Image (spheres, rainbow, N blue to C red):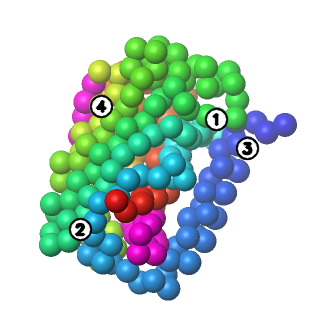
Amino acid sequence: MLREGHLVMLHGSLLSGAVAMLLLSGAAWADTLADVAGRYAIAPSSAISFSVGQVGGGGISGKFPKFSGTIELDPGNIGRSRVTFTLAPGSVTTGEARVEKFLRSDAVFDAAAYPSITFRSIRVTQLDSSTAAIDGILAARGKSRQERFTATLVKYDGRNVTFHVVGDVLRSPYGMDVGTPIYSNVVKFDMIVQGRKF
C-alpha cells in the first residue's frame, strides 16, 4: 500500500518524467512565444497538479480534473497577452478518499460554498523566447490575491500548444492554512497546460 509520502514521490517522478519527455519532443520544433500567437481554449487533456510538503518528508499531492480557460497570445506584443482559468476544487483527486473529503470540506476549499477557483492575468512578462511570467489575480474562498506563475513553451504543432506551468501559492491568505506548520503553507503547482486554437 502506498503511504502519502510515497504517493507524493511517485506522483512527482511521473510528472517530472512526463515533462522531460515533452521537453525533449518539443525541442525539435524550436518555436518561440511569438510563433504560437493566437487564441486557445485550454484542453481537457491538460494536467493540473499540486503538492503540499510535510515536515519529515511526504505530504499531499493531487490533481484537479475539472477546469476550463483560455490563452490569448498577442502576436505583436506578448505583454498584451491574457490568460483566464477556472477550476473546480470539488473535483480534487489524491488517490485517498479521506484526504479528498477533507480537502473539499470547509476546513480547506469549502467547495460547497465556493465551487470555483479563478485566475485572471493582469500582466504577462516575456522572460526569454519561450518563457513568460504570468501575474494575475487568484480568487478562492471569497478572497483574492495577486500570484505569479511561469509558463514555458514545450510543443506546438500549428494548432495545439503545450506549456509547462509552475508556481507557488501560499495557503494562509485564502484561509486554508489548516495543518500548518506540520504541512507546508506553500502549495506547489506543476502543470502541463495544453491549448487548442480557435
Crowding at dot 2, Cα within 10 Å, few <14 / some 14-19 / many 20+, comes out as some
CB-based contact (under 8 Å), mark 1 and mark 4:
no
Image location (x, y in percent) of residue 111? 46, 20
Q: List the residue tagged with mark 1.
A: 94
Instruction: Check residue 139 in the rendering and tell me which mark sits there, or answer none.
Output: 4
Dot 1 lies on which element? loop
Q: List the residue tagged with mark 3.
A: 6
- Please report whichever mark, 1 or 4, sits nearer to the chain's N-terminal start: 1
For badge 2, the amino acid type reads Gln
For badge 3, the amino acid type reads His
CB-based contact (under 8 Å), mark 3 and mark 1:
no
Q: Residue at x 39, y 28 (%)?
A: 116
Instruction: Check residue 182 in the rendering and tell me which mark sits there, or answer none.
Output: none
The span from disc 3 to disc 2 (Cα, nearest Å) is: 36 Å
Dot 2 lies on which element? strand
Residue 174 lies, with reference to residue 10, above or below; the image says above
Q: Residue at x 41, y 69 (%)?
A: 159
- Please report whichever mark, 3 or 2, sits nearer to the chain's N-terminal start: 3
Q: List the residue tagged with mark 2.
A: 126
Give the quadrant of residue 176. top left
Relative side of 72 to 104, left or right: left
Image location (x, y in percent) of residue 125? 21, 62
Of 7 and 186, the residue lying toward us: 7
Give the quadrant of residue 162. bottom left
Span shown in magenta: 143-163
